[in-house]
Amino acid sequence: MTDPEQKPTSPRRRPGGRSARIRAAVMEATMQMLKDRGIEGLNVAEIAARVGVPESTIYRRWKSREGLVVETVLARMNDTIPLPDTGSFRSDLHALLQQSASFLESPDGVLLTRSMFSTMNRTDSEARQLYWQTRFSHLGTLVQRAIERDEVRPDTDPGAFITAMTGALYVRMLVLEAPLDAAFLDQLEQMFLQGVLKQDKKIDA
């Protein structure tokens, strides 16, 4: 029996409800339009129409077309390249290099990487900073964990390490237009291991 003095409670809002669904739908529509038309054909008004929201809703969330592209790239990368956590820096680095190369050379990886760099060369320093800060912070966790496990020298800068690693991959792919093949990845892995592992951890490197 209901207590007559008990006031009805408002239904609880589920975390991630409509806002999360709109965000996912917008990024999916962005990804599809990039595939269909490339970065030059990306149109925010059409994305809004496909999703069924006002264009202003997208600009409130992402501020600019460049910001939308950057977040779409970040989301796809984080889904496709999960941060390895094997308990060993050597194994983590090997997995990260393999996953990164596999993604970067896939059709989606080529499309998103070129779209991202094209977008960043235009304007929007905020979008550019968002991408690199988010990506470096995410990947830097791998190095920080290795420092805490006493595998990597404590003076190793996670940001500098990730800058060198990603720079090597992007330069080979975009500037040299060379494949991210097994020989290159193995050489890169050994160079980085020898550069940051503590002396007593280099035996098997």
Image (cartoon, rainbow, N blue to C red):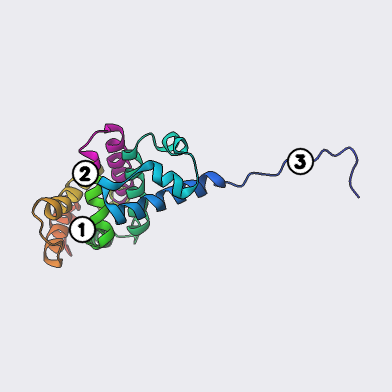
Residue at x 34%, y 62% (from the top left corner): 86
Residue 132 is marked as none
Task: Please provide percent x and percent y for residue 80.
Answer: 34, 59
Q: Give the residue number, with chain letter if any, for mark 1.
A: 201
Q: Which comes before the other along the chain, label 2 or label 3?
A: 3
Q: Are marks 1 and 3 in contact (CB under 8 Å)?
A: no
- The disc labelled 3 sits on which kind of residue? Thr
Q: Is the stretch drawn in magenta largely helix, strand or loop?
A: helix
Task: Please provide percent x and percent y for residue 200.
Answer: 19, 57
Q: Which comes before the other along the chain, label 1 or label 2?
A: 2
Q: CA distance from mark 1 to mark 3?
A: 60 Å
Query: Which callout, 1 or 3, points to the residue nearer the camera?
Result: 3
Q: Give the residue number, with chain letter if any, for mark 2.
A: 118
Q: CA distance from mark 2 to mark 3?
A: 51 Å
- The disc labelled 1 sits on which kind of residue? Lys
Q: Quick check: can you spot residue 27?
A: yes
Q: Establish if 176 lies above or below 98.
A: above
Which stretch did the figure color magenta? 118-142
Q: Secondary structure at mark 1?
A: helix
Residue 179, quarter of picture? bottom left
Q: Give the residue number, with chain letter if any, for mark 3.
A: 9
Residue 6, quarter of picture? top right
Q: Quick check: can you spot residue 154?
A: no
Q: CA distance from mark 1 to mark 2?
A: 41 Å
- Residue 136 falls inside the magenta stretch: yes
Q: Which comes before the other along the chain, label 1 or label 3?
A: 3
Foreground residue among 196 and 48? 48
